[in-house]
Amino acid sequence: MKNIYFAWWADSIIRIKVFNPKMQDWEMKIFILNTTLNALNYWVIIIWLKYLNILKIPLLTLDIFPGDVIDNVISAIINFATPFIILNYFLVFQKNRYEKIVSLYQDGKLNIAFPYAVISVCLSAITVLMYGLFWN
Amino acid sequence: MYSGGFSQKLDKWGVPSFGAGYNFSQSGFYYVGNNPRVYPAMEAQLQKQYAGVTAQTQAMIAGERQQREVSQAWNNLINNTNMTNIGIWDIGTIAGATGMAGDYAGMQNGSFRLTNGKYNGSQFSFKYYKSGWQGGSVAEITTYSISKLGKGVSTGANVFSSYLAVQEIANGNSSPVTYVDATVGFTGVLNSAASYYTGKEIPIVGEFVMFYGVMRTTWDVFFYLGQNYGPSTWYGTNNAKWFK
């Protein structure tokens, strides 16, 4: 599991550097994207558990800003993304650990990052569809 | 039916009857109005009392009416905005966002300036350059590329729209626009992934998501502020306040 996780990160970093060589803030962008994909998968699991009446995990709901949009976005980040922000930062980005990770998987023919993104988004879309059709 | 008496005649004609005297049991002078007799001190007190009650009743009626109107408007909104029949509110939002994205796509090559350059004192002077001029000249004007600006924040906008839909669904507080949020957000995330991992990007998607996120937030915040702090709330629910 650990190897797949690092292989996925290595593939993500190698690909973003290959296909976007002029991108300067690639670290931040790849961090945001991959963390969001992690958060989406976590959300999918929580939603299925909730609406199949298996397990209801209490969620934080903020009411600080005017309207609902900003509150909802911050709540979602805290609820779903925070664990992965911490995990990804300390395992991959702290003290440029990604350099070592990339060097470990440099020669491997990896094709994990984009399929993972497609599957994650598709699962999320299916969950939204299921929610709209049956659980709403 | 007894219809005699001068006072009754005046009453029938709509003229208030009148008179004066001294009531020993009440220890005071009185004037005769309509039945029952009301003494001057009592009348002032009663007038004050009934004025208060009247204002309170009017305020209650006005509050109830306003609440009913809000509830009705909300019900109409819900009824008009279901999955099979997206209402005017959503269409307006989507159309606005699409229109702006279209306009934006048309000026993707453009650039803009915020100041008139160091030579002219760097005073605020916004100007759009359709040619995408990169700045410089004698005035040392700095310009910003619109496409670069859009791409710079598109990842954040994708994430923003996705998280918005995710939280609404997780809370079970979704509305028809939640599905639009989800579609826009997920499409944006996939577009960013395609761009980063394959070098191919779906045209306009990033910019569209950015504008959608901005418009959605702006609409939501201003709708909330208008509803809670707008002119309709400046005088509370007491519509009689003006006449006090």
Image (spheres, coloured by chain):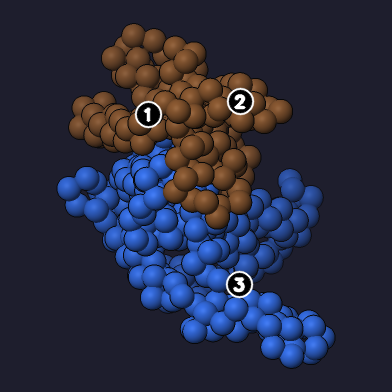
Chain colours: A brown, B blue
Q: Judge whether A93 appears above or below B215 on screen.
A: above
Quadrant where the C terminus of chain B sits is bottom right
Residue at the spot of label 3: B144
User: As rendered, which of B194 and B48 lies closer to the eye?
Assistant: B194
Q: Is residue A61 left or right of residue B172?
A: right
Q: Using the image, name the chain to which the residue with label 2 belongs.
A: A
Quadrant where the N terminus of chain B sits is bottom left
Circle 1: residue type: Lys
User: As rendered, which of B183 and A50 lies closer to the eye?
Assistant: B183
Residue at the spot of label 2: A100
Q: Using the image, name the chain to which the residue with label 1 belongs.
A: A
Tag on residue B110?
Answer: none
Q: Judge whether B143 appears above or below B21 on screen.
A: below
Q: Say what secondary structure mark 1 lies in.
A: loop
Residue B224 % position (x, y): 53, 53
Residue B212 % position (x, y): 42, 57
Circle 3: residue type: Tyr
Q: Quadrant of residue A92?
A: top right
User: As rendered, which of A55 and A36 lies closer to the eye?
Assistant: A36
Q: Say what secondary structure mark 2 lies in.
A: helix
Seen as rendered, the residue at the extreme front is: A107
**Mark nearer the viewer, 3 or 2:** 2
Q: CA distance from mark 3 to mark 2?
A: 37 Å
Q: Is residue B184 left or right of residue B16?
A: left
Q: Quadrant of residue B164?
A: top left
Q: What residue is rendered at 62% in x and 67% in y? A: B242
Q: Is residue A134 left or right of residue B215?
A: left
Say whether residue B167 is visible.
Answer: no
Q: CA distance from mark 2 to mark 1?
A: 17 Å
